[in-house]
């Protein structure tokens, strides 16, 4: 198969991580030509991970998310005349870990399926809220394969040429992911996902790549996992941990790469200048060098600064943090809730907690206003320096 692959990457460090090298190695095995689009001006670190694997590298401004990168690659960097020299096109971004099984296996299993484009995962119809937006069932865009009939159609080229540059994550999803599915479907092309072969039955609004991850990876041999699965705000965080354990036990993936992302989601930029002791701790962990800060586990540094730790909040983040603490072998005193009526499952109120100068409190809510309200509630028992705000961790923030 004469196949073109375009892979997009971005991070603030201008770095090619080792997990990207793993992905690109597999993509290259299934592609005649592999182009890397970097949403930054130059690779500063990690180029050895892709040495000999990438045919062409393009650099661009970090604008328009992955869809902007793909549009520039198709319309400008490569051009349609050259794109049409290929029989298939892979568009992929750096939002997933993989591949846990040979990628060729996925292509072979999809080879016999009657479809014009496909992806690794997809989801049923549903809706977004705030603001409301209803969407149809669609294939997820982080990994998509377009076969010749769809690739060389007039509507495919026109979609990219007319695609508006998204200014937000929501616009990127609705404009590109949902948009390309709707466009091709409207013109008679059929799409499906690798997960369609698994015969799972997702509920409305359910994203199986998170909600059914363990089953998809273990039973259906889906070879990827979204990086966002390791975020503490993921309602299916426990299933993610179960999947990571499985991959480790089976020796299918270097899970330390996943665990590094898991830990570094708790990085708070600038936090470690506030305390020389904390800065020394971060540097001792090998995660800072000189004045240049790179992501490290700010939560770990905070917890090691106190003899006693409480987790404030018993919602999704609070319960996931409790699981995370358990897996890390960190001790904590318990979960704190504001109202006595919410003190279920072993949670206690602030008045019941034993808080002194040696106590740190992790406020496990994402909403900044709610977090500040909790902080004001704790003012009578501890200082602000004794609080760690999950809402300040930039990697955990919900994109808008």
Image (cartoon, helix red, strand yellow):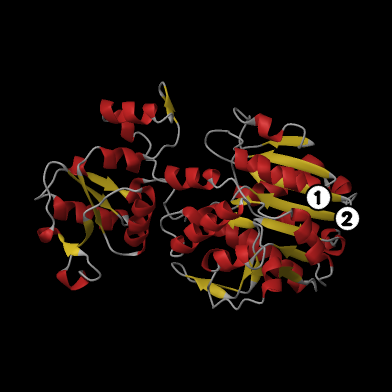
* Residue for point 53% across, 33% down: 13
Tell me residue 120's x, y (percent). Answer: 68, 62
Neighbours of disc 1 within 10 Å: few (<14), some (14-19), many (20+): some
Would you identify the image quadrant in which residue 113 lies?
Answer: bottom right
Q: Give the SS element for disc 2.
A: loop
Residue ID for mark 1: 30
Q: Is residue 370 visible?
A: yes
* Label total for image: 2
Which disc number belongs to residue 219? none
- Which quadrant, please, contains the N terminus? bottom right
- Asked whether the beta carbons under mark 1 and mark 2 sit within 8 Å of each other, the answer is no
**On residue 87, which mark appears?**
2
Q: Look at 49% across and 42% down and name the residue there.
A: 260
| Left or right of 30, for residue 262 | left
Relative to residue 69, is residue 131 drawn left or right?
Answer: left
Looking at the rendered structure, the secondary structure element under dot 1 is loop
Mark nearer the viewer, 1 or 2? 1
How crowded pointer 2 is (Cα within 10 Å; few <14, some 14-19, many 20+) is rated as: some
């Amino acid at each position: 198969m004469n196949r073109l692959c375009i892979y997009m990457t971005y991070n603030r460090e201008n770095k090619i991580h080792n997990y990207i090298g793993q992905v690109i190695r597999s993509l290259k095995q299934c592609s005649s030509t592999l182009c890397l689009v970097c949403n930054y001006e130059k690779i500063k670190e990690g180029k050895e991970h892709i040495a000999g694997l990438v045919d062409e590298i393009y650099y661009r401004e970090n604008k328009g998310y992955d869809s902007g990168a793909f549009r520039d690659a198709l319309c400008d960097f490569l051009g349609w005349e050259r794109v049409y020299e290929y029989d298939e096109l892979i568009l992929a971004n750096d939002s997933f870990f993989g591949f846990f099984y040979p990628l060729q296996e996925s292509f072979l299993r999809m080879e016999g399926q009657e479809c014009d484009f496909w992806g690794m995962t997809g989801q049923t119809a549903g809706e977004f809220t705030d603001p409301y937006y209803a969407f149809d069932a669609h294939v997820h865009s982080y990994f998509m394969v377009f076969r010749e009939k769809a690739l060389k159609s007039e509507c495919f080229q026109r979609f990219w040429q007319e695609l508006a540059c998204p200014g937000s994550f929501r616009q990127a999803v609705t404009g590109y992911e949902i948009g390309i599915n709707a466009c091709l479907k409207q013109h008679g092309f059929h799409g499906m996902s690798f997960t369609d072969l698994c015969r799972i039955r997702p509920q409305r609004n359910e994203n199986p790549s998170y909600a059914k991850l363990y089953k998809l990876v273990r039973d259906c041999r889906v070879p990827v996992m979204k990086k966002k699965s390791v975020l503490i705000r993921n309602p299916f965080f426990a299933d993610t941990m179960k999947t990571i354990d499985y991959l480790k036990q089976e020796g299918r993936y270097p899970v330390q790469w996943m665990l590094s992302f898991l830990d570094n989601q708790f990085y708070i930029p600038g936090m470690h200048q506030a305390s020389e002791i904390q800065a020394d701790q971060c540097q001792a962990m090998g995660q800072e060098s000189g004045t240049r800060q790179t992501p490290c586990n700010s939560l770990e540094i905070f917890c090691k600064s106190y003899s006693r730790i409480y987790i404030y909040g018993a919602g999704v983040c609070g319960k996931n943090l409790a699981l995370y603490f358990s897996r890390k072998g960190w001790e904590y005193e318990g979960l704190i809730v504001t109202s006595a009526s919410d003190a279920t499952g072993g949670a206690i109120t602030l008045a019941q907690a034993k808080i002194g100068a040696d106590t740190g409190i992790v406020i496990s809510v994402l909403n900044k206003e709610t977090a500040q309200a909790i902080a004001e509630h704790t003012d009578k028992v501890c200082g602000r320096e004794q609080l760690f705000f999950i809402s300040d961790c930039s990697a955990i923030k919900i994109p808008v």
